[in-house]
């Protein structure tokens, strides 16, 4: 039986050609690009990738496996956009490539069938993730996590990498949080809380602490049933139709009370850019929803946070998640919140805005490059001699924690909101006891 022919796709035509011409090839983006800094290959730089994809779009180059490799290793961290004096919208260019590749075949063809199923049909669903992680949670509770980690060495490398990144798991509260959590003290606001998918599955305590911190600041928290993944995973893979499904699901969940809310809060820095900037493009009816989305750090800084009182006497550092710093220009707010904590000494992290290598699903789709970039980030963290490292995105938390596991003592890797709640409540995390 003859193979199914690939669909006809006119490559690069889903992008305004002016986006290519905006780049003047000055090279100021090179120093900010993690992959170029790793390989020294111009084709692994932002301007190199722009040149390659433009050549394909203009018919001057063929879409060879080598060319695809250079494009695929882009982290989409957008550090180049922050560095670019010409305002080049590099994210639109790499998105054009991803969307065309999704039309030509399965997203991330380098992955096996099982990995793709886990990535697109397990990770974005909180309920499925809760069930999938239950055996690991049980093994941890029985003190058998070391045994599980030992036998994971028998798995294929691709699946072993996915298992190794799973952190120590706390008890899941999936589906049990109250729909409304009342404000404490004088009423200062009312928000909806996006609990997400992987973030809540891996770090349920951060979801709960986000709501608690909001309550402490006089904010009523509404957690609507029926909400789901933000859709960023599918959107960045060029899979717009599934992404639209998640947009509509969240619009239906939050829509009935949208006008009553001061904001829709997310604590996942990687989700924020899609929620704010792409929801209205995917589904025009979601424009009002997108306009209300705020990152938790951003919202608290604007509200004026109540000062916590319990000391957290440790040296700590902060990593700028790409989705926060480059995607949303949120840099000072997390630091301002951490500096409110009595006793906490916040020290600078070298190359704080350099990507850690998580980049959504990157540590699964490009494990070798993710390993190299992650190791560099971990070395920078160790150089601070900090007892804790904070960052505002689930992928960064997983990636950095994985690369710091061999440290003794092991630093506490946590969301800034976890530190803030510890200072509000006096409940010290076990990592610091």
Image (cartoon, helix red, strand yellow):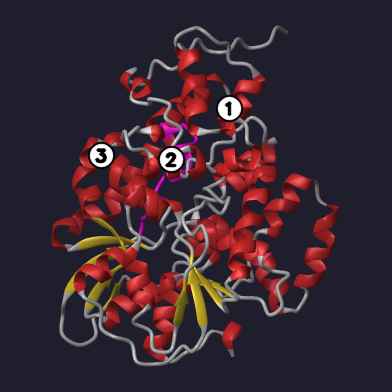
Please give the range of residues in magenta: 224-241
- Disc 2, SS: helix
- Residue at the disc numbered 3: 280
Q: Quadrant of the N terminus?
A: top right
Q: Quadrant of the C terminus?
A: bottom right
State the residue in front, 369 or 120.
Answer: 369
Q: Verify whether residue 169 appears in magenta.
A: no
- Residue at the disc numbered 2: 80
- Residue 5, position as x, y percentages in the image: 60, 9
- Residue 373, position as x, y percentages in the image: 62, 50
Q: How many marks?
A: 3
Query: Disc 1 vs disc 2: Cβ atoms closer than 8 Å?
Result: no
Q: Is residue 176 left or right of residue 432?
A: left
Q: Residue at x 79, y 71 (%)?
A: 146
- Residue 20, position as x, y percentages in the image: 38, 21
- Residue at the disc numbered 1: 43
Q: Relative to 342, is 257 above or below? A: above
Res 296 seen here: no
Q: Verify whether residue 234 appears in magenta.
A: yes
Res 359 seen here: yes
- Tell me the crowding category of disc 3: few under 14, some 14 to 19, or many 20 or more residues within 10 angstroms, Cα based: some
- The majority secondary structure of the magenta stretch comes to loop
Q: Spatial distance from mark 2 to mark 3, Cα to Cα?
A: 24 Å
Dot label at residue 291: none
Precedes in sequence: disc 1 or disc 3: 1
Dividing the picture into quadrants, the one containing residue 265 is bottom left
Q: Which is in the foreground here, disc 2 or disc 3?
A: 2
State the residue in front, 264 or 247.
Answer: 264
Precedes in sequence: disc 2 or disc 3: 2
């Amino acid at each position: 039986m003859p193979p199914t022919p690939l669909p006809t796709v006119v490559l690069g035509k889903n992008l305004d050609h002016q986006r290519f011409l905006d780049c003047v090839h000055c090279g100021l983006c090179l120093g900010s690009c993690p992959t170029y800094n790793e390989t020294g290959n111009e084709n692994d730089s932002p301007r190199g990738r722009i040149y390659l994809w433009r050549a394909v779009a203009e018919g001057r180059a063929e879409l060879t496996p080598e060319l695809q490799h250079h494009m695929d290793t882009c982290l989409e961290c957008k550090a180049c956009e922050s560095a670019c004096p010409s305002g080049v919208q590099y994210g639109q260019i790499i998105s054009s490539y991803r969307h065309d590749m999704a039309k030509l075949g399965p997203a991330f063809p380098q992955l096996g069938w099982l990995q793709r199923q886990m990535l697109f049909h397990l990770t974005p669903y909180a309920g499925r993730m809760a069930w999938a992680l239950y055996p690991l949670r049980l093994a941890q509770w029985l003190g058998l996590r070391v045994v599980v980690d030992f036998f994971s060495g028998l798995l294929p490398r691709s699946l072993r990498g996915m298992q190794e990144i799973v952190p120590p798991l706390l008890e899941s509260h999936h589906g049990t949080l109250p729909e409304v959590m009342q404000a404490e003290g004088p009423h200062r606001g009312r928000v909806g809380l996006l609990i997400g998918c992987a973030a809540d599955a891996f770090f349920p305590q951060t979801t709960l602490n986000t709501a608690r911190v909001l309550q402490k600041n006089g904010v009523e928290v509404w957690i609507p049933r029926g909400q789901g993944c933000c859709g960023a995973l599918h959107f960045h893979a060029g899979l717009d139709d599934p992404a639209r499904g998640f947009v509509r699901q969240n619009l239906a969940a939050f829509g009935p009370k949208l006008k009553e809310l001061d904001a829709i809060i997310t604590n996942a820095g990687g989700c924020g850019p899609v929620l704010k900037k792409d929801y209205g493009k995917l589904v025009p009816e979601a424009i009002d929803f997108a306009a209300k989305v705020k990152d938790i750090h951003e919202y608290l800084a604007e509200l004026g946070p109540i000062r916590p009182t319990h000391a957290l006497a440790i040296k700590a550092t902060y990593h700028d998640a790409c989705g926060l710093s480059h995607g949303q220009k949120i840099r000072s707010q997390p630091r301002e919140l951490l500096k409110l904590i009595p006793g906490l000494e916040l020290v600078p992290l070298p190359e704080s805005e350099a990507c850690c290598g998580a980049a959504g699903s990157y540590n699964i789709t490009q494990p070798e490059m993710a390993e190299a970039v992650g190791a560099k980030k971990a070395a920078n963290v160790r150089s601070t001699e900090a007892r804790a490292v904070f960052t505002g995105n689930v992928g960064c938390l997983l990636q950095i924690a994985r690369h710091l596991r061999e440290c003794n003592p092991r630093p506490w890797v946590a969301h800034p909101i976890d530190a803030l709640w510890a200072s509000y409540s006096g409940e010290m995390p076990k990592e610091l006891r």
